[in-house]
Image (tube, rainbow, N blue to C red):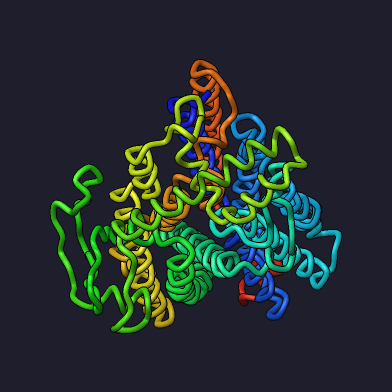
Amino acid sequence: MFNETVVDLSRLQFAVTALYHFLFVPLTLGLSVLLAVMETVYVVTGREVYKRITKFWMHLFMINFALGVATGLTMELQFGMNWSYYSSFVGDTFGALLAVEGLMAFFMEATFVGLMVLGWDRLSKGKHLVITYLVALASNFSALWILVANSFMQNPVGAELNPITMRMELASFQTLFFNPDAQAKFVHTVLAGYVTAAVFVCGISAFYMLRRRHMEVAQRSFRIAALFGVLGTAGVITLGDALGFIGGHAQPSKLAAMEALWEPEEAPMPFNVIAFPSQEQERNLFELQVPDVLSILVTHSLDGTVPSIAEVQEEAKGRIRNGIPAVMALERLGQDRDDAEALAIFEAHKDDVGFGFLVQRYAPDGDLTQITEADVELAAKDTIPEVWVIFWAFRIMVGLGLLMLGYFVVGIMLTLTNKVQHQRWFLHASVWMIPVPFLACEMGWIVAEMGRQPWTVFEILPTWLSVSTHSVTYMVVSLTGFVLLYTVFAIVEMYLMVRSVKKGPEEPNERELQQRGLQPQLSTD
């Protein structure tokens, strides 16, 4: 039986664990590539300082990597624990992608990480560099398969619902893999990871420069990261535009919520810079607009329009009415799989079967024959996510992205002119910038996942139908347990990171001092 509290607690638990896990993912993606870049400089130049730089950031990478693996495993457990019907429904499709991710990326990544960390004195420079590149490649491969799976939830292509087994069965792996949402999201997410790592390295390097410690490592690390970051930020903004363009066509309800667009507007449409949306009143209590900009941003033209919330809801009503016969046909097929008439009805209405599931939550005892127009109205309103959350999360993400672009532009000008170590205001700002990309990534996740509601598989499987049949007590206890566990993880992470940063990179060896034209001091003891 449907229990709204259990659904809300299941969503909250997954959100808590996913948001925490996603703190580690971008840094792992970006820092793995930055390590490869730094080590390449070491191999090409032969200068020992770049080996010290690489080994220092590699140590911080390993701390982040270990915590990321630990938090990722608990996330996957929840599919079977709290989302059992969802797991059964999409297992044939979603499971294949997770299996490929595990076999091709996770084991590959774990294997080469060990060789990377322990192989400095056992492998030649060239071989160790290849291993470092393989770690970066494996990290990004891991993200690729996860994002393909996530994009299936956002834009379910490449699979079809079998009315007999009640499963989404894989129809075309090629279509699934080359889902336009997946390709744009992968590049956007990976580039966001590069930006995160760049800000992280710049911030810690600035910390050392403020204290006049490890100056050579800090200045060189800052320069590499700043160049890396400005390219990544420009890419994030560009691919974010492409992702919005693709997502706007695939998920008009999310786009309407992102723009707090309640009623139809004529082209060219204004852009809401600031708005205070009211879901109850279905309007903005306050809005500050820029004329014509929305049409340009979303449709890349002055005559393009974006569907409003009112239009999305009106379309949903028709799809709900059309989806009810499909669900009723599925119930008949569940009793008699040879019912040819029921199969024919399902085939005629299957494109809207998800909307039939959506309204079923309002049916007394699940009996769709008792659905009223008022129930259809309620289900249509459900198709719109929480507008104020999506609206502001999107703007925070974009605003922070533009802030980071400006930061890196200034950083590059200062580091290329060898002035960055003297600009204490900028160094202080760099330290305070460290949390910014993490917050931007979290906001992006909220837009993507909360914007998909009320669906776990967009317009096919509603969230209310996806959860396991747990008690409220069970959900409260498990949620509390996860919060406590992740709090411990957070404390461990911060302790290890702070301790490593305070310790700093290793001191230069005799060979490096000779390269710099210095002689090591001899002890007089």
**Nearest the camera: 328 or 450?**
328
**Nearest the camera: 321 or 90?**
321
Residue furthest top in the image: 473
Quadrant position of residue 309 = bottom left
- Measuring 22% from the left and 78% from the top, which residue is drawn there? 292
Relative horizontal placement of residue 30, taking residue 251 as reference (left or right): right
Name the spot of residue 197 as percent of width and height, x first: 52, 61
- Measuring 53% from the left and 18% from the top, which residue is drawn there? 471
Check the image and report above or below for 477 versus 230.
Answer: above
- Measuring 24% from the left and 74% from the top, which residue is drawn there? 269
Quadrant position of residue 302 = bottom left
Relative horizontal placement of residue 478, taking residue 315 as reference (left or right): right
Name the spot of residue 171 as percent of width and height, x first: 74, 60
Name the spot of residue 190 as percent of width and height, x first: 57, 64
Name the spot of residue 270 as percent of width and height, x first: 22, 72
Residue furthest front in the image: 341
**Nearest the camera: 284 or 203?**
284
Check the image and report above or below for 8 versus 436.
Answer: above
